[in-house]
Structures are given as structure tokens and as C-alpha cells.
Image (cartoon, rainbow, N blue to C red):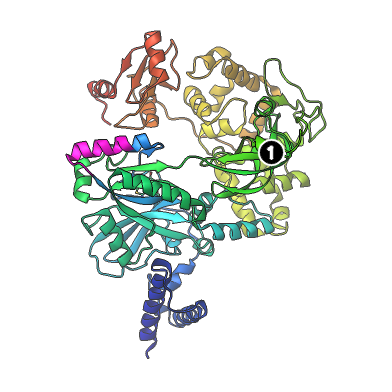
Amino acid sequence: MQPADRAAWLRQELERHNYLYYVLDRPEIDDTTYDLMFRELVDLEADHPELRTPDSPTQRVGSAPVGEFGTHRHAVPMLSLDNAFEEAELRAFDDRARRELHVDRVDYHAELKFDGLSLSLTYRDGALETATTRGDGDMGEVVTPNAKTLRGVPLRLRHPVSGLLEVRGEVLLFKDAFDAMNAERAARGEQVYVNPRNAASGSMRQLDSRITASRKLNFFAYAIGAGPTLAPTQSGTLARLRDLGFAVNRESITARGIDELLAFIERAQSLRSDLPFGIDGVVIKVNDLAQQATLGFTNRGPRWAVAFKFPAEQAMTVLQGILWQVGRTGVVTPVADLAPVFVGGVTVTRATLHNMEDLSRKDVRVGDTVIVQRAGDVIPEVVGPVLEKRVGDPPHPTEPERCPECETPLVRKPGEVALRCPNRQCPAQIAAALRHFCSRGAMDIEGLGAKLIDRFLELGWLSDIPGIFRLHERAAEIAALDRFGEQSTSNLLAAIEASKTRPLDRLVFGLGIRFVGDRTAKDLAREFRTLEGLRQCTYEALLAVPDIGERTAREIEAWFEDPENHAILDRLLEAGVAPVEAEAPVGDLFVDEIWVFTGKLEQFSREDAEALVMRYGGKAAGSVSKNTTAVVAGPGAGSKLVKAQQLGVPVFDEAEFLAKLAAAGIEL
Ligand code: IVH
């Protein structure tokens, strides 16, 4: 056989076996035979580079790194779904659908809600052309080489589809692959991922697709974004997608009416812990596409689908001890040391106990069997003890008198529950402050995680935040650290360099001023625009910012008055940190006004509405006070609406707000 024919045959056979294995779950050959065929194709392509094709299975092992990800506009926006948490909400959804469709019963397609990251795959004339992450829903990052490494993604469709076909689905890291990967990372002294979703997301965002390939990610298709209609129903569409070569999860049903739907949800919930991948609910879609079209969309998402979210997962385990942890502002909090337990998709060994008051209220004691809860991305917490299982009468936990890290006597300000270490040089505080500064939501310095920070602190290469920007002086020493090397060093230094021009609010958040979370940091950046402006802020000016109360204003004022902090800022500026200033308003419709949005809005999200008010010179607040100009209340508005009515603050509905915009000539 000619090399060209042999290569074509191998490609076809290998893809067929991929399909049998990952889509149909019905392999015909063993792994060794597959590997031999694969090797043969790799060798053939190496000898005859002209035989290489973009859809060759050899492309699945990844390729040389790209400099950065491009962006791509989705042909159809990737919307999100409304959530339901209770049966009553599902019944309301069903009532509305039946009413609007004028039928007694609606058939739904119910699918698992995969807890990974969504991906859009564009095929042109049957060949995979682009793969894009969700991004902001309109534009995403192009991760095509990474997508080619996914199991369950065909590089070429198994049947002809001419023109464009955009397929959507979820990228997942299965639980066993996640555990294996974290075990390896831990062994190499690298930071472990907190859960399979973060790991999948991190893996898809690798510039080097060979790393993505090594992570063994899966993909499940669940919808079509753009392209021809493949079938008249959602269930039919999924069957066609499977036929075309996509992995489609089989745990789904077509439910005839709400009762069958509820039964499926119950089943999914009991299946959950036994599934090889994480799910966080069930997605319910009107099965008939014609009925979907009748129901249509709002700006946020389809009116023919809803996501039923499972409640937080709980598990029982034993409280082995209580550790006292020093945070970045010196607050000392109790942390539960738990016998390892698998809950909410991760193995948990630590959980927060909040503070001493909470601990006493819950009456948790060392040795107790406790209930641990974990919801979404939040830190696991101890809900309380299982009193029936308590053995004897273990002693009540007591607070430490000295800092567990630096032995400084702890203090408590009058009226506060927080216990604090007053020593600003406390190593635990410094480490925590550095971790916070480098974290995702703050300066987002990739690669400078907890482990490396600790190492640099131990070595004396780092002792405070501005020191991060002098690490380049130690490039050679860093590269000489074991398990590091030139490439990692230059990546790290590039990440540090890139962080110098983060938006101002990220820097402000990263500084770790007490009570200044990401939202307050955004408010501050918008109000004061520049770092210089913020440095000169007065208590009065701070109080004038909506949502900043006296306590927070005092903390911020004190922070900026402290000469040590001034020195930190000066050193950051000297090192070239140049935060990007907040966007200036483009109009004055809302000047001197404070707006509050509450309840459900149809046309935009609350964040978008707030951004709009700010773009036109106003302020947005999260709570209603006598200074509030107006409240826009949608369906489901609660206490904020009541408060506005009590205070006599004008209340508008969304239509009135839109009319105000339209009258001023502002287009959405
Ligand atoms: S369909 C128009 N089906 O859930 C929206 N989404 O808020 C079409 N997800 O980020 C989405 N499993 O990534 C759909 N079986 C499933 C899903 C699913 C998980 C995710 C999706 C999106 C979110 C929806």
C-alpha cells in the first residue's frame, strides 16, 4: 500500500476506534493495538510531512504553544439559563410554558447539568475550524488546538454537513483523572486544583496544547448554536450529534409533563455521587423545537429552558482538631481539621468555622462527628455537630491567647467578634497578603501561588508586596531552584510584568485593605479614577460613595494615612506598576444620582444596568438609603422595594427606566 493510502486508512480507523471508545463506549480493540496503530501514523507523518492533515488523530496530542489566544465572536450569543432551586419554581416554569403554548402537557428533555466549562465548536463543511470558550457570552477565546485534544470531539464530522455547524457542549475533567493529576502536582510540589471544574478550565486555557492533551479532558455535546436544524426535537438533535461523532451523555430523558421531570431530577440527585464526573443540577429544555421558537428568548436566555440547581452537598466526617489560622489582616479564625471526606466534587480536609462566636453557638467540639457543606465554589463550612454521635462530654474549644505563628498576644477590639494578631510583621499575615495580592480576582499573577510564595519567603527573596516586582533580579537563582528551570522562570516574570497594568480596582482589591472586597474596590476605582486620586481621599469623600459606610470609610482612610502604606505604594509605582484608570463617564444623564436595581430585569443583568448608570455619570448602590435617587424594581423584588417605599424613594419598573433612557437618546 502507498504511504498516502496507508495514512488515510490509519486516520480513518483510529478515528473510528476513538468513536467506538469515547462516544459509543463499545471498544473493539485493546489499548495496545490502538497505540501501535497510532505510533505507525505518527511515524508515517514524520517521514512524509505532506501527509499530515489538520484532522489527523495525531493532532490530538497537542502542538507547540501559541503566544496568546485570539478572540472570536459567537455566531449566536452563548446565553445562560435561569436557575430554579425548588419544585415550586419548576411548576411555575411549566405553568407558564403550558399557558403560552396553549397545551395541557409539555414534553421536556431533561439532561444532566455538567459542572465544567462550556465550549463552542465551529465546523465548516464537516471539518473542525474553531473552538471558542464562552467568554462574556458574545466573544470568547479561541482554543482550537486545545479542543482538538478533547475526547468526544470529532475533528471531522462522520457524515457530510455542508456550510457552518456550531456545536456547544461542556468540557469536563473526570473525577479519576482529576485525582491522578492533583496527586502528581502535589508530588511535584505544585499547587493542586480545588475542583475538577477549575482544573478543566485551567487546562483549556493552556497556551501549550500538549499540556491540555496530557490532562485527558472529556467533552459532552448538548446543543447547536448555529447551522442547519438536524431534527425537530432536542432529543433528536442529540441523537444526530452522537451520530456525527460527538460524545453525548446518555443519562437524559424525554419527560412527558412535570411529574416525570421531577422523578428524573430525583434520580439524577441520587446518581450524582456515583457519576464519574461532576454535575450541579439538571437542565430542562422544552423538547419540541417549534415550541421552543414560540416561547423565544429574553436578553438573558431562553424562555424554553431552565436549570434546576441541586442544593449544597453535605457529608459527615469527624472533627479531628481545630487549627487557628492568621489571615492577611491579622484576623485569627478557627479552621476545622477534618478526616478527609468527599463532598461537592472534592475531598475536603479543612473547613471554616468562621469565629469563636459561631463555634460556641454551634457547639462544635473536637472528636465530634460533624456535617460539612460545600456549595459551588465557596469554602467548605462546618454546619454543626451530629449530637447523637457525640461520645461523652468533650471539652469546649478555647481561643488561643497568642498568635499561633509569631506568639504575639492576640487582641480583640471592643465590640468586634474578630480576634487579631497586632504584629504587622507576622509571617503568616505577610504570606496571606502576598497570596491575596497575586490571586485571580486581584492582580492575577499566574504561577505565583501559595507554594512558591512560601518558598520565596523562606529563602528571603520576598518579604512584602513591592518585592514581587524585584523578583526579576533573582531570575538566575529562581531558574536554579529544583523543579523550576528557565521556561517557568520566564513565564513567572512575564506574568509579574503583565500584572503591572491591571485595572485600578484589581490593585486596590489586591492591597488587602480591611472591608474592601472586589465590589468596594470597583466603587473606589470609579469614584476616584486614579491611584493618586484615591491616595488623597478624605473620610467625607469616602462616605459619599454609595455602599461605603462609616466603618469601611474609617478603615480606608486609616490605610491611606499610614506612612508604611505610602511607602508600599511609592515602591509599587517606582517598580513600574501603572494601574489602568477607571473608564470616564460618556454622558451626564445620571449625574449626582444614586440608583438601586432589584428583582428580576428582562432586558439586562443588574451589573449591566449599573454600568449604564455609571457610564452616564451616576452611581449604583446595592442598598437603599435616604440618599437613593430611585429604585428600579423587577419581579421578585423584596426588602429593597419595601425600604424604598418606607423612605419615599421613587420606584420605577424596568419599562419606565428604559423609557427614561430612550427619552435621553441612549440606545442599548
Ligand atoms: S444548554 C441557552 N445543557 O450550564 C443555554 N447547558 O446556564 C443552553 N450546562 O454555562 C445551555 N450542562 O455550559 C445546556 N446539558 C446542558 C448543560 C448546560 C451544563 C451549562 C452551560 C451553561 C450553563 C447554563
Q: Is residue 501 left or right of residue 148?
A: right
Image height of 470 relative to 420, above or below: below
Relative image position of residue 145 (x, y in whole percent)? 44, 62
- Does residue 569 show up? yes
Residue shown at 54%/12% (left/top)?
Answer: 540
Residue 22 in the image: x percent, y percent? 42, 67
Q: Is residue 410 above or below residue 17?
A: above
Determine whether, in the image, residue 160 is placed left or right of residue 579.
Answer: left
The three-letter code of the residue at mark 1 reads Ala
Q: Position of residue 507 (x, y in %)?
A: 56, 33
* Residue 209 against residue 404 in the figure, above or below: below
What residue span does the magenta drawing correspond to? 91-105
The residue lying at 35 percent from left, 41 percent from top is 81
Q: Main secondary structure of the magenta part?
A: helix
Q: Spot the residue most to the left.
A: 102
Residue 466 visible, this angle: no
Residue 4 appears at what percent x and percent y? 37, 84
Image quarter hosting the N terminus? bottom left
Q: Nearer the viewer, residue 88 or 131?
A: 88
Badge 1 element: strand
Q: Disc count in the image?
A: 1
* Residue 137 is a magenta residue: no
Mark 1 = which residue?
336
Q: Nearer the viewer, residue 51 or 76?
A: 76
Q: If the image is split into quadrants, where does the C terminus sit?
A: top left
Residue depicted at 73% across the width and 56% down the height: 481
Beta carbon at label 1 within 8 Å of ligand 1? no
Q: Nearer the viewer, residue 485 or 441?
A: 441
Q: Residues within 10 Å of mark 1 (few under 14, many from 20)?
A: many
Tell whether 426 sits left or right of 529. right
Q: Quadrant of residue 190?
A: bottom right
